[in-house]
Every structure is written in C-alpha cells, then in structure tokens.
Amino acid sequence: MASEAHRKGPGGFHPLTPVATRWGRVRAASANVWVSTSEGDPSKALLESLKGKIQDQELVVLNSLSATTPKTKPFAGLTRSFGIERKSVIVLEEFTEALVKSLRNLSAFELRRADDLNAFDILNAQKVLLPKGAFQRLEQRIRNGVISR
C-alpha cells in the first residue's frame, strides 16, 4: 500500500487541491493549469453571471415595478408568481421610499440598485428580477465598462 506522501502531487499537495498564488490565480497542484479570477475585470464577471441567469431562465425583466404608498401586500404574491423558494434579488433603477418600504419586509428578496449590482449578488440569488428601467441602466453600465466596487 502506498504511503500518503506518494499519493500527493508535486510540492506535497494532493493533486486536486487548488493552490492560490499572490496574483489572484488558482492552479491545480499537480498540473500547470491556470484559471484567472475576474479581479481585473469586474464588468466581465457581471456580464458572465447575467448570461448564466439568462441561460438558466432565472432572469426576469418586468414591465414596471412601482408603488405609490408603502404597502407590502401587493408584492407578497411575487414569490408565488415566479416560483421563488430562496433569496432572490430585485434590481431597481433608483430607490423610492414607497417601493423600498413595500419590499423590505419580504424575506425572499434583497434590493439592489442597478449601479451597485455585482456578480456575487447575481450568483447567490435564485432569480434576478429587473424592471425595464433597471435593465437598461445595467446594460448601459456594462457597455461603458463602468463598474462600482
């Protein structure tokens, strides 16, 4: 039977153990395979995460989402309407007081502005709901490459 040292790859790491480098890259310990993280280009990470949600049919563009008075009841049916079972993100063009107060009591949703949305928010959400205005602002932000950190 081979000892544990013989089962490990070069440098004493198990072959499947990722090894982080100081340049933000990860490589497999047993092969010279490099996977670059998206630290240098957050707009690409945002774009790729949105593409994934579109392919999985988890991105929903709404005609509008507005509230004149702060009431949660009109929005309570959103979870059933879109089959939401865990945390999802509602992306707004701008926060309005009535809309924020209406949606903040719904535990299934997190609110984000289109200017502040990042890939992490998208990947951790079951679904992403965007009104048309927020979608257009997000599209403009990606085209211009302007990403807030």
Image: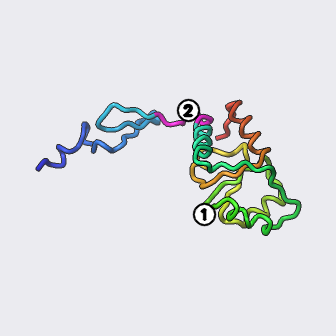
Tell me where residue 8 sits by quadrant: top left
Q: Decide if residue 12 is on the left or right side of residue 23.
A: left
Residue receiving disc 2: 40
Tell me where residue 11 sits by quadrant: top left
Circle nearer the viewer, 1 or 2: 1
- Find residue 72 and report its horizontal and vertical position in percent: 78, 67
Q: Amino acid at mark 1?
A: Glu
Q: Secondary structure at mark 1?
A: loop
Q: Is residue 38 above or below residue 1?
A: above
Q: Is residue 67 above or below residue 15?
A: below
**What separation in Å lies between label 1 and label 2 (alpha carbons)?**
33 Å
| Classed neighbour count for the residue bearing mark 1: other residues with Cα under 10 Å, few (<14), some (14–19), many (≥20) | few
- Find residue 122 and report its horizontal and vertical position in percent: 61, 48
Q: What residue appears at the point 60 percent right and 36 percent down from the top-left corner?
A: 42
- Find residue 100 and report its horizontal and vertical position in percent: 78, 59
- The number of numbered badges drawn on the structure is 2
Q: Amino acid at mark 2?
A: Gly
Query: Residue most toward the right?
Result: 68
**Circles 1 and 2 in contact, beta carbons < 8 Å:** no
Residue range corresponding to the magenta coloring: 36-44
Verify whether residue 39 appears in magenta.
yes
Q: Secondary structure at mark 2?
A: loop
Residue receiving disc 1: 85
| Classed neighbour count for the residue bearing mark 2: other residues with Cα under 10 Å, few (<14), some (14–19), many (≥20) | few
